[in-house]
Amino acid sequence: MTGFETMLDRLADDMPSEDRADADDSGSFHAPDLPGSALQAAVRGMRGHCPSCGNGRMFPRLLKPFAHCPLCGQDWTAQQADDFPAYVAIILTGHIMAPVIIYMVSETDFSMWTNLAIIIVMAMILIGALLQPAKGAIIALQWWMGLHGFDKPPRPEANPESGK
């Protein structure tokens, strides 16, 4: 099935879109509003925004990030999140679901099959809801720390124009 997804990705990449604009009408990118800390960058990534400028979208689709930020031009091709976002989503889902499962098994009068159906549906929804924010945060942290081919962004202390 990966060949089919790749073909769809190529078709979507070839299609013109206003969201895919790499520059504004004058052909230049907007200056990024760099985050003040790794936490701020991670929160921007979790929200699906560009960690560099905070305004551009990071994901045109579910889990594939833009190659470059549509607003500031930050290159995201160096990211290597791999399977780590899935591990984070699974760990968080397990910790959230554990008390729910304990409560459902010990305090409700549902049958075993009803409990199982409810638990599986809740777990799948949680994993689906947590996967993109986890990937955005991990890419943002890789960028902030200068890992996997990213150039480490200037810190607020080194940027006198930030005014902070």
Image: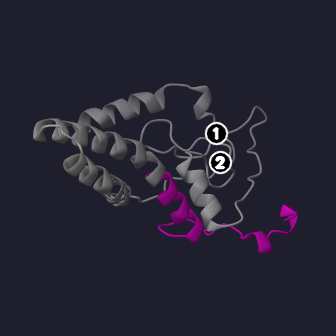
| Observer-nearest of 46 and 67 | 46
Which residue is pictured at 44% across the width and 29% down the height?
12
Residue highlighted by disc 2: 73
Residue picked out by circle 1: 22
Query: Residue type at mark 2?
Result: Gly
Query: Residue at left 63%, top 34%?
Result: 21
Q: Residue at x 88, y 63 (%)?
A: 163
Question: In which quarter of the view is residue 9 placed?
Answer: top left
- Whether residue 13 is in magenta: the answer is no
Mark 1: secondary structure: loop
What x and y, as percent, mark residue 68? Answer: 58, 46
Callout 1–callout 2 Cβ contact below 8 Å = yes
Check disc 2 and report its element: helix, strand or loop. loop
Q: Tell me if residue 151 is in the magenta stretch.
A: yes
Q: Nearer the viewer, residue 138 or 67?
A: 138
Q: Is residue 95 above or below residue 5?
A: below
Residue 139 at x, y percent in the picture: 50, 58
For the residue marked with disc 1, what is the amino acid?
A: Asp
**Quadrant of the drawing holding the C terminus:** bottom right
Q: Which residues are magenta?
A: 135-164
- Splitting the image into 4 quarters, where does residue 113 fall? top left
141 relative to 102 in the view: left or right: right
**Residue 143 visible from this viewpoint:** yes
- Judged left or right of residue 66, residue 114 is left
Q: Is residue 78 visible?
A: no
Q: How many marks?
A: 2
Horizontal and vertical percent position of residue 17: 57, 26
Query: The N terminus appears in which quarter of the rendering?
Result: top left
Q: Quadrant of residue 91?
A: bottom left
